[in-house]
Structures are given as C-alpha cells and as structure tokens.
Image (cartoon, helix red, strand yellow):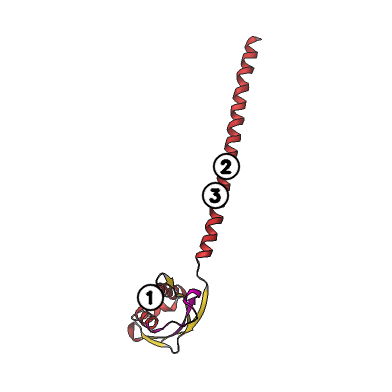
Amino acid sequence: MADEKDTAAAEAPKKSNKMMMIIIAVVLLVLGGGGAGAFFLLRGDTAEAAAPKKGIITAAESTITVNLADGHYLKMGFALQQTEDSGETAVDLSEAYQLAIDEYTGRTVAELSTAEGRAKLKEELLAKLVKAYTEDDVKKVMDIYYTSFVTQ
C-alpha cells in the first residue's frame, strides 16, 4: 500500500508539469500571434501613407512615331499622372518624349503585340520617367497612360 501512495504522489507532479507546459505554450502562441498581427497592421498603415497621391494629368499634345525593328513603326500618344506634390503646374514633356523614343526604338512588333510585353515595357519606361522627374526627393510623376498605341 505504501508503494501505491508513493506512485500516486509521484504522478501528481508530472500532471501539473504537463499542465504548466500547455499553459505556457498557449500563452506564447497568443502573444506571438498578437505581436505578428500588430506588426502587419502597423506596417500596412505606413505603406499606405507612403504612397503618393494623384495630382494633375499632363497629356502630350501630339503623338510620336517610333521606328521598330524590321521596318515597322509605332505611333504612340500618352499622358503623365503627376503626384499631388508636383503642384498644379504641368511638367515639361520633352524628356518624357525622349525616354519613350529611346525605350521603344528597335523593339519588335511581337514584343508589343502581347499584353505582357506591353506591360513590361511600360514598367521600364515608368521607372525611367519617375527617376527623371524626381527633384529633391520629390516624385513629380507616378504613372503613364497611353492614349494611343498603334503598330504597323
């Protein structure tokens, strides 16, 4: 009988240790989940705050014609979406024309005939435009819209 009491007494601490481990694990999971949730919520707010707000749109007055590969050409018109930080004055499009001509000259019709191809070239051109129209860390241009895009 004494052996049974000793065995029962020995088992009791094991159960409480298991219960304590479960409680600690649950508390750590709750704290970790809350911390991760707070991190993602706070990070989302700063990303939205950092996004520039739309300002005026400056449309190119005329289309440009660009020589493509194999005797083809591209006739393109566009407008630039300026940021709110750029003010109410339209940017000079001379550099935008030059960047567009440089980006599209020599491209093949096959590159421009797919949505993926046009999107890739537009992203490349937009990156160059944003860089060109950034002064004193103020981005003046945030997007480009094609008003016409014809290949032949």
Badge number at residue 97: none
Badge number at residue 132: 1
User: Magenta segment: does it hold 125?
Assistant: no
Question: Which residue is tagged 3?
Answer: 36
Whichever of labels 3 and 2 marks the residue nearer the N terminus, that label is 2
Identify the residue at horizontal 62%, vertical 26% (top origin).
Answer: 15
Residue type indicated by callout 3: Ala
Q: Which residues are magenta?
A: 76-94
Distance between the Cα atoms at labels 3 and 2? 10 Å
| Circles 1 and 3 in contact, beta carbons < 8 Å | no
Mark 1 neighbour class, 10 Å CA radius: few under 14, some 14 to 19, many 20 or more:
some
Mark 3 neighbour class, 10 Å CA radius: few under 14, some 14 to 19, many 20 or more:
few
Examine the rendering and report whether any part of residue 147 can be seen.
no
x then y, percent, for residue 68: 35, 83
Whichever of labels 1 and 3 marks the residue nearer the N terminus, that label is 3
Whichever of labels 2 and 1 marks the residue nearer the N terminus, that label is 2
Distance between the Cα atoms at labels 1 and 3? 38 Å
Residue 14 falls in which quadrant of the image? top right
Examine the rendering and report whether any part of residue 133 can be seen.
yes
Distance between the Cα atoms at labels 2 and 1? 48 Å
Identify the residue at horizontal 56%, vertical 40% (top origin).
Answer: 28
Question: Which residue is tagged 2?
Answer: 29
x then y, percent, for residue 112: 42, 78
Q: Secondary structure at mark 1?
A: helix
x then y, percent, for residue 8: 64, 18
Q: Secondary structure at mark 2?
A: helix
